[in-house]
Image: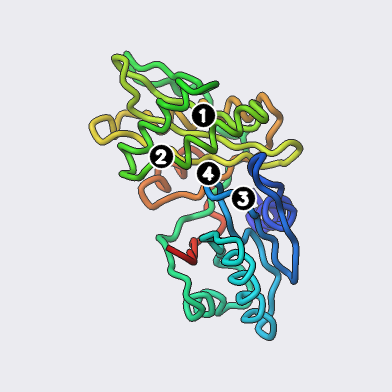
Amino acid sequence: MDHAAVLALYDREMREGARPDGPAARIERAGGVVRQIADASGWNGVLWSGLDAAGADRAIREQIARFTGLERDFEWKLYAHDEPADLAARLFAAGFRAEPAETLMVAEVAGLALDMAPPAGVRLVRATGPAGVDLVVDVHERAFGTDGTALRHRLLARLAADPGAVVAVAAVADGEPVAAARMELVPGAPFAGLWGGGTVEAWRGRGLYRALVAHRARAAAARGCRYLQVDALPTSRPILQRLGFHPLSATTPYVYGS
């Protein structure tokens, strides 16, 4: 893989050329910034910026004014290769707080092994409506210790508006969901995003994460996506590298608001 070329493609198609990630969201482009505005349960934030040292502070103030005017907390999704080089320090000085950094990892779908199955006694259940979404959200809450209300709302809204735009799947053992993940697709985009891969503690280390990656990769291949993209935590990065994903950059969410 030509890392520089693929990263440039990702920036161009998925950040600068971003499309809204749900029916209640819209993309705005203003002053060298691409941002998404969504309802209170959706993702609000800055996806891309083409800034220089002279205009960065002004652009930061403009984003704060735009989102706070809508009474929205928001995220500035900063990548290690973004300019200016001190943009992170400028965000911090403006009142943003940094969440844990992740690694942007990409794989070509054609190069992945797609025949990995879940362990014996585990079946994969695709979420196509409320019952399946409840399985996915249940895992999310138990695996990550966070409230899944916003995730439930977003998944149900996306499935209702465009069932082909999201693949959400839960791994079920003895009637209980033990792992889950989702994939989000944009029509015509070369990248599909893998999100929310989580396993409840008692089932970790049994290959469920790999099986869920393979399941979503097969779905991406069927839809003609060339690349899979993951914002990987340190716990996931070694697994993804063994599967054929390449680290291209680091990304840190800078959050403004409560």
Q: 10 Å neighbourhood of mark 4: few (<14), some, or many (≥20)? A: many
Viewer-side label of 3, 4: 3
Sequence-first disc among 4 and 1 = 1
Disc 4 from disc 1: Cα separation:
21 Å
Q: What separation in Å lies between label 1 and label 2 (alpha carbons)?
A: 14 Å
Q: Which residue is mark 4?
A: 245
Return the residue nearer the eye: 189 or 108: 189
Using the numbered discs, state the Cα–Cα distance from disc 1 to disc 3 in whole angstroms. 21 Å
Is 159 situated left or right of 242 in this image?
Answer: right
Of labels 4 and 1, the one closer to you: 1
Q: Nearer the viewer, mark 2 or mark 4?
A: 2
Residue 167, quarter of the rendered image? top right
Q: Residue furthest bottom?
A: 54
Residues packed near mark 3 inside 10 Å, few (<14), some (14 to 19) or many (20 plus):
many
Residue 98: % across, % down: 43, 67
The kind of residue tagged 3 is: Ala
Q: What number of labels is visible? A: 4
Q: Position of residue 135 (x, y in %)?
A: 40, 25
Q: Quadrant of residue 131?
A: top left
Q: CA distance from mark 2 to mark 3?
A: 17 Å
Name the residue that disc number 2 marks: 148
Q: Is residue 19 above or below residue 225?
A: below
Mark 1 lies on residue: 168
Please determine whether, in this image, residue 46 is positioned above or below residue 181: below
| Amino acid type, residue under disc 4 in the picture | Phe
First in residue order: circle 3 vs circle 4: 3
Looking at the image, is mark 1 or mark 3 earlier in the sequence?
Answer: 3
Q: Position of residue 9 (x, y in %)?
A: 71, 53
